[in-house]
Image (tube, rainbow, N blue to C red):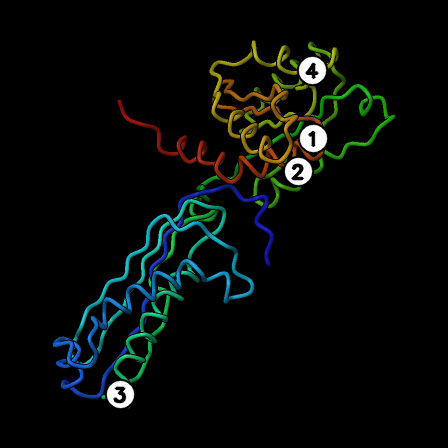
């Protein structure tokens, strides 16, 4: 099974179709008159589809179990064909395409089973996905201009050369994945004046996005918030809240992070944990969604 641990939960929808074509109008007449068996064929197909949707992961090996928030089975008869549509909704880490396909298919098979005694010429066809939405790709904006970024590593030990930087390099790797251009990378010691000087220089050079890693913990030398927060024109609490909430599901110590985010002019600054794991998880929580800010800049609201 494909790992989805680093995914966040978003709303997913999917609609699939299956078409069952009977060989004569007499079959449809029998279906409508319930003269085949003492049961409603279409309603039985609907019930079977709902059961199938809920149990998709039990019969398709690489499917993840998914909580189903809503499922609907709809029928439309045109000529000799019964069009079956299964529409599914969930809020989860992965989508419901297979659940929709499974539901539509099982409904068709159930109807086939109940009609086969009077019609041996039926055909099930056009099993296909009609629509799907959700996941990271839905929130990946197409920007008209590239985003220029800088990564600052705040660490006395890395600046002194006694330790290697892994978190900053991990952040760069995530940025490259989303086609963000890293224009600057540097390591500075945990000194308020040096951090402020570097941040101001990057803002003056019109860097769009500054990601700072390190100095957001509870140690006596963790002074990144004290250095940068007074420089902000606007703080954006939701960004850090999203990162902490994501991290909290994986590591309880995330509650002690003092990560923050805000704007200096039009430059977006996000301060992330200094641990490699904390930095990676924060990037997974925030990207590509954070890039929507730059889409907003392309189309500012009118007064």
Q: Which of marks 4 and 2 is nearer the N terminus?
A: 2
Q: Tell me: residue 175, above or below residue 113.
A: above
Q: How crowded is mark 4: few (under 14 residues within 10 Å), some or many (20 or more)?
A: few
Q: Distance between the residues labelled 4 and 1?
A: 25 Å
Secondary structure under badge 1?
strand
Q: How far apart are marks 3 and 2 (CA)?
A: 64 Å
Q: Mark 3 points at which residue?
A: 117
Mark 3 against mark 2, which lies toward the viewer? 3
Mark 3 against mark 4, which lies toward the viewer? 3
Q: Position of residue 273 (x, y in %)?
A: 66, 26
Q: Are marks 1 and 2 in contact (CB under 8 Å)?
A: yes
Q: Tell me: residue 236, above or below residue 38.
A: above
Q: Earlier in the sequence, mark 3 or mark 4?
A: 3
Q: Where is residue 146 in the image (x, y as percent from the top left)?
A: 52, 39
114 left or right of 102 in image: left
Residue occupying image coordinates x 14% and y 85%:
25
């Amino acid at each position: 099974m494909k790992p989805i641990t680093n995914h966040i939960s978003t709303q997913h929808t999917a609609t699939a179709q299956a078409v069952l074509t009977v060989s004569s109008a007499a079959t449809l007449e029998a279906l409508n008159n319930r003269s085949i068996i003492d049961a409603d064929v279409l309603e039985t197909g609907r019930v079977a589809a709902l059961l199938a949707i809920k149990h998709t992961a039990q019969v398709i090996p690489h499917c993840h179990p998914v909580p189903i928030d809503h499922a609907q089975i709809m029928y439309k008869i045109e000529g000799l064909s019964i069009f079956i549509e299964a529409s599914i909704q969930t809020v989860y880490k992965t989508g419901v395409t297979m659940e929709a396909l499974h539901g539509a298919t099982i409904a068709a098979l159930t109807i086939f089973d109940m009609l086969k005694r009077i019609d041996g010429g039926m055909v099930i066809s056009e099993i296909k996905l009609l629509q799907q939405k959700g996941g990271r790709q839905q929130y990946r904006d197409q920007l008209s201009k590239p985003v220029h970024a800088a990564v600052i590593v705040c660490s006395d030990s890395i600046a002194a050369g006694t330790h290697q930087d892994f978190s900053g390099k991990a952040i760069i790797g995530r940025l490259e994945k989303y086609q963000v251009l890293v224009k600057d990378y540097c390591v500075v010691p945990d000194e308020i004046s040096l951090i402020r000087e570097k941040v101001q220089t990057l803002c003056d050079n019109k860097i769009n996005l500054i990601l700072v890693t390190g100095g957001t913990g509870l140690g006596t030398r963790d002074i990144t918030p004290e250095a940068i927060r007074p420089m902000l024109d606007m703080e954006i609490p939701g960004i850090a809240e999203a990162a902490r909430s994501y991290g909290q599901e994986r590591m309880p110590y995330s509650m002690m992070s003092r990560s923050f985010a805000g704007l200096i002019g039009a430059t977006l600054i996000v301060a992330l944990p200094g641990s490699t794991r904390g930095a990676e998880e924060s990037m997974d929580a925030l990207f590509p969604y954070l890039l929507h800010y730059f889409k907003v800049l392309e189309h500012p609201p009118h007064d």
